Image (cartoon, coloured by chain):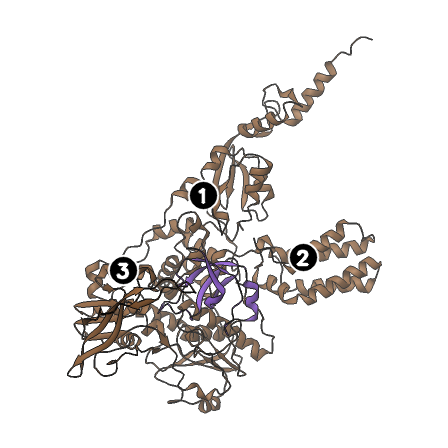
Amino acid sequence: MTFRQGQKVEIFQRSTDESWEDYMEAFIGLHGIITDPDVSKNDPDALIEVSLDEKGTHRLPQDCLRIIEQ
Amino acid sequence: MDSQTCSVKKLHDQIEQTLNNGSLSHPRCRQRATEIFDLVHDVSQGLAGDDHFDSILELAQNLVDEGLTPACRELGEHVAAFVDQHQEEFISHIRTHTCPTGRCPMLTPAPCQMACPAGIDIPSYVTLVGQGKYAEAISVIRRDNPFPWVCGLVCTHPCEFMCVRGRMDKSIAIMDLKGFAAEKAMSAQSYQNPEPGPDNGRKICIIGGGPGGLTAAYYLALRGYRVTVIEALPVAGGMMMVGIPRYRLPREVIDREVAMIESLGVEIRLNTRLGKDVTIESLRSEGFEGFLLAIGAHGSYKLMIPGEDDYEGVIPAVSFLRRVSLGDHRRPGKKVAVVGGGNVAIDAARTCLRLGCERVTILYRRTHDQMPAHHEEVVEAEEEGVSFSYLTIPKQVQGADGRATGIVCVRAELSEPDGSGRRRPVPVEGSEHVIEADVIIPAIGQEIRPQGLEAFEEVDWTRRNTIRVHTVTMQTNQQGVFAVGDAVTGPATVVEAIAGGKKAASAIHRHFEGIAQPALPRVPVRRRRLPHFDLPASLKTDLDRPKMHQLSNDRRRITFQQVHLGFNEQQAHEESKRCLRCDICIRCGRCVEICRDKMGIEALCLGYLDFDTPGPTDLRITAERCIACGACATNCPTGAMQMTDRDGYRELSLCGTVLNRLQLEYCEVCGAVLGPARYHDYIVKRVRDVSPTSNGRRICLECARRQSGGQHAEITPPPR
């Protein structure tokens, strides 16, 4: 899945990526907006920046995200 | 709103319940409990000082020690244990005046502030800009970010994506207001450093003078540390200086803000590379006790195609931009092919145009829609004359006499979405073609060059070849060694590096002071509580986000002058007045519910309140329907909705936006305020069946009662 700036996403599951940290468990189920996708090459493995509703901005692996609104 | 539990609010409610249920029968015990309740209430309202925490514990202990009744002792023990268990949350409420769960209404941060990686108190500085207090605005910003001017020009502004006004029409131009304030304050020489703390004698070495390293240097210097920054390049600023072209971020802007950091006593050693000019041993022998690795990601990915290393004229984008930034303004060639679809590719292409290249083409293997570069960057590149060749895959660099002459490409088409939903570019057979180019600039990604860091033997690396840290503290596996910026995140944004630098400075301080490190991300701090602007709903609605003036296209193609020319003062002031002040209104929606469900009026059309499914918003409709009953204001938990009587009118306002203004009526008998006619009519209609006494007259309840009593007195009982 390719993420673009401004898309609404949900953190629908925990990531299996090594960059996933314990405190991120509390983000599961939250909605947010992609604010800085991978701006170099659309790499599905890149960490991308998401602003979560009421929970701040974080760089997260893509396998925990799904698009809920284009 | 978030339904997470806030410990402060939970204790607040528990004590309130205990006070109300009558279990505390002893008067002194009730008094102590009330005092504890008041203190916890202060914490939940953002009114607490540093002594509140200890005072709560002390009072709880008194309840236990006095042991007046079992219930008293039980309450004391509970409060002491609870506060101790949730110590960090209580202290966080007291120090940051913020409750991230949203359960303490007065402390709920605005979405823009929560979204800012650096946690800048955006509503406060936006308001200060509107008041014309630019130096104060900069001082608020620099509590969380020492580069307001840089970020006012090149921030990726996640805050604007979360801006609540954006759900209504267009988000506030938060970034541009920051740039405006910084320019004004710097120009007026009112851009000042705060007073640093006393020298604590500890020496910290920061490897890399980019935004992350310099931010950490700033906050450490303010805490009294002696900071030295080791920088391999001949200039400070890192990627801000050598990665972002001058037409987006003038060098003077970086120079001025770096100079502010240096003036705090931070030493920056330029042209000094770790592992070559200095070693970890030599630095330790100089007395450095802590290290922060902030080396950035200055390496480029290669195209991995034949001919790439064989010809002159193939220049990685990062090297090319660095060369130009450091003063080499020679034209690299006539015909340029930039490979990649990201922001760096766009920067390289636009830089080539400014250096006089005749034709600049960006080759991207996917479609326009899938370009990872920011949309506005792509549009500006197109305006300036950069060509784009989409669905184009480079296969080989061609050359003659040792110099590149072209790039062999194949056309591509996108496959059907795969399991992950991605459509991959698939080469079209027989579509090989040559694009003439004497300069080929690969811009397909950056990587970290770890040379020199081998000395930090315990520092762990991720599979992405970035430094592994705990992202809450930026602490690496090696004791006393921290890391920030692109070296940790991979190529990311300036504001993320700044946020990392601030976190690292705090963690380094805690490390040396022996204070426990936080386990959860920092909560942003509310710096000010400022009054809102008063303006009519129609004006609030009609104000549009100003369009920023740009340099003429001709000038853009031939110079490195700044493209975005900034707001003028009037634009900045008007823009700040568009802010909905979400630091005051927490969007709980209680006002809308009361008006619609309890009063049956439905005068508030505030669709922007909902993040997931925002509905239509019309601030002007309230004036048509509202009866000015005040139910919304009475039930507002933060005082955002207010109803006031002044100059013969009753006014309903939301964070200063006047939603309704109705003329007041007065009692015909005693002259007391009756409220507006619409309200009076509503009440009369509701009570006419039970109390028809007013007979159409405008009289207050008191007089109506008196009149009714008189009527009863005149009634003659029927004869028996």
Whether residue B121 is visible? no
**Which residue is denoted by mark 1 in the rendering?**
B616
Q: In the rendered view, would you say B118 is above or below B639?
A: below
Label located before the other in sequence (2 or 1) = 2
Q: Nearer the viewer, mark 2 or mark 1?
A: 1
* Residue identifier under label 2: B10
Please, what is the three-letter code of the amino acid marked with disc 2? Lys
Task: Indicate which disc, 3 or 1, sits on the residue closer to the N terminus.
Answer: 3
- Colour assigned to chain B in the rendering is brown
Q: Chain of mark 3?
A: B
Q: Amino acid at mark 3?
A: Glu
Secondary-structure class at tag 2: helix
Rounded to the nearest angstrom, the CA distance separating label 2 from label 3 is 52 Å
The chain holding disc 2 is B
Q: Judging from the image, what secondary structure is the residue with disc 1 in?
A: loop
Note the chain letter of the purple one: A
Q: Residue furthest front?
A: B429
Give left or right: position of B174 versus B439.
Answer: right
Position of residue B632 in the picture relative to residue B557 (left or right): right
Kindly identify which numbered label has been placed on residue B380: 3
